[in-house]
Image (spheres, rainbow, N blue to C red):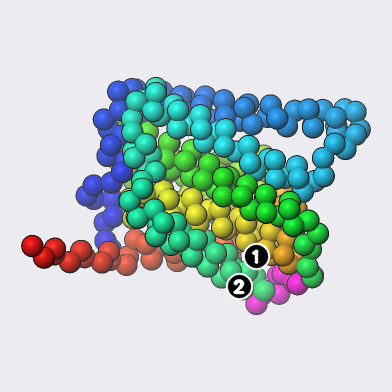
Amino acid sequence: MQNIFKGEHFTDAAREAKFKPHPILQLVMFVLVFYAGQILMSIPLFPIIFMQDFMGQTVIDEGWYIALQLVITVFPAAISILYCRFIERRSIGSMGLTRRHCVRDYAIGLAFGAGEFVLCLLICYAAGAVSYVGTDMNNVACFIVICVGWILQGAEEEIVCRGFLMGTMASRLPLWAAVLINSAFFSIMHIFNDGFNPVVFINLLLFGIFMSVMAVRFDSIIPCCAAHSIWNLVQGNVFGLPVSGMMTGPSVFRFRLADDMELWTGGVFGIEGGIAESIIIIVLTLALLFIPKKKKSAEIA
């Protein structure tokens, strides 16, 4: 097996950070920054939640509310970047946000994410765990904003977990340990989502490892941002299935998960919580680990 953890990686630059406390304190600081981002996200939502839950008045359509939830994920991403730049004082490149080959890498990530979900859906369909219901495109404008929202939301979780936490941990710990730590936190951060259970935890841990291995393999989190975003978009707004325990507004198609096959489908959490996803994610992770990198041809003088 090719050891992709050897050699140079974008996380190496995090070792040059001016603020590198003990790993335990690093985790504490990360949690504080993470929740600061969540608080910032809650500010635009609070008036809507107050009017709906306490006043009994609907002030925004469900689809537009979902769009808003996705768009405001820019806040945790922004505060993570600001913390890394001005507190840890490390470069943007140390977070895996690289401009080199970014268009190519984003396209590769899109192919990975879309292909991964379609394979999972086909396995579930072959097992009789999903069925086609029809179309559900009732608000094109909302659909477009949600698509933009998924681009932001997928990038946000990758910036927070792979760019911020993995880089921070790698400044003091071996890279493989940083991969496991950020992947575990990625899984834990979904603990309050509907349908969360031990299988979901394991699958999200595997997904975090897959994203981390992809970041290490491509020396960038750009393909991870793309893969994460397109998975959520295709799952929620192309095939109309729940994403991490929530329904996601207008969809090109609408599929239904079988009630008695939760082990395959992930139930109300979504396909990322079922064993179809477990199978695909393990295969893709092994592919990234085993398939050798193409050697660069020598430059002609």
User: What residue is rendered at 30% in x and 23% in y?
Assistant: 18
User: What residue is rendered at 75% in x and 72% in y?
Assistant: 131
Q: Nearer the viewer, residue 56 or 196?
A: 56
Hey, what amino acid is under mark 2?
A: Ile
Q: Are marks 1 and 2 in contact (CB under 8 Å)?
A: yes
Answer yes or no: is residue 262 visible. Answer: no
Quadrant in the picture for residue 87: top left
Image quarter of the N terminus: bottom left
Membership of 139 in magenta stretch: no
Direction left: furthest residue: 301
- Relative height, residue 291 to residue 228 (above, below): below
Hey, what amino acid is under mark 1?
A: Trp
- How far is disc 1 from disc 2 in space, using C-alphas? 9 Å
Label 1 residue SS:
helix
According to the picture, the residue beneath numbered tag 1 turns out to be 264
Q: Nearer the viewer, residue 229 or 23?
A: 229
